[in-house]
Image (cartoon, rainbow, N blue to C red):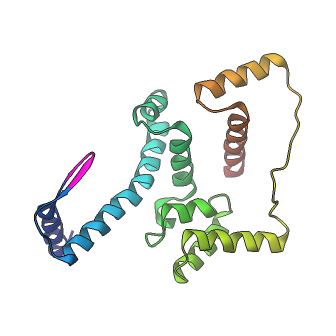
Amino acid sequence: MSRKGADRRRGLSRAALAKRTELTIQGIVPINTWRELGEEIFRISESSTWWLGDWLLYGRDKYPERYKKAIAETSLDYQTLRNYAWIARRFEPSRRREGLSFQHHVEVAALAADEQDLWLDRAQQLDWSRNELRVRLRASRARKGLERTSPLPIKIDVEPAKKAHWEHAANQANVDLSDWIKSSLDNAAQIALQS
């Protein structure tokens, strides 16, 4: 960190006291310090989703038995953490755009890597919000005939014992069966596409 950056951080730490459930601003601070403090809080908030995703990926790879316990101990729901890990896996750090939010990356995560980069580059260059990126993606898909307005029903026949097994797994994950099946199929598709 540069000397100037170190000085700025010291100034911010003198300006506010942060606790888990509270931020206390010390006395009267100049507007620039107040603004910088808000920017720093936003950067930490935005970064934490990437950090949690990377942390979970590391745990999954290095401590497979402890991974589920780590998820349980964060107090965030399984699906949220699974999403963080999935997005972190879809974007290695060198492809993440600092100028865009985690949610921008979520919008394009299901695309192929070259398409992800194309849309993220556009969003960054044209200063699109996450909502603007979503609108542009939908319009592009609609032009290509790829966007449906309602979910596509799929019917599968399964033995009662297998259904009971899946229901048990869904209950363990605290999600309903249809969400568990969709999530499992999404995960399987991602693994198959990475091979």
Name the residue at 78% across, 22% down. 163
The picture places residue 49, in percent across and down from the top left corner, at: 44, 53
| Front residue of this view, candidates 75 and 34 | 34
Q: Residue furthest front?
A: 28
> In the current view of this chain or complex, which residue is farthest to the top?
161
Q: Is residue 158 above or below residue 179?
A: above
Q: In the figure, residue 11 lies in which quadrant? A: bottom left
Which residue is at the front of the view, 120 or 74? 74
Figure quadrant of residue 15: bottom left
Which residue lies at the image location 51% right of the left edge and 49% below the top edge? 84
The reply to whether the magenta stretch includes residue 92 is no
Identity of the residue drawn at 44% across and 32% down:
63
Name the main secondary structure of what is drawn in magenta: strand
Q: How many marks?
A: 0
Residue 101 lies left or right of residue 131; in this view the side is left
Figure quadrant of the N terminus: bottom left
Q: Is residue 107 left or right of residue 42?
A: right
Q: Above or below — where is 118 with respect to 179?
A: below
Question: In the image, residue 53 lies at what x, y percent?
Answer: 47, 48
The percent coordinates of residue 61 (x first, y second) are 49, 39
Magenta part of the chain: 18-23
Relative depth, front residue between 53 and 107: 107
The residue at 81%/54% (across/down) is 150
Q: Is residue 190 above or below residue 132?
A: above
x, y percent for residue 140:
75, 74
Question: Does 26 appear above or below 49?
Answer: below
Q: Is residue 8 left or right of residue 179?
A: left
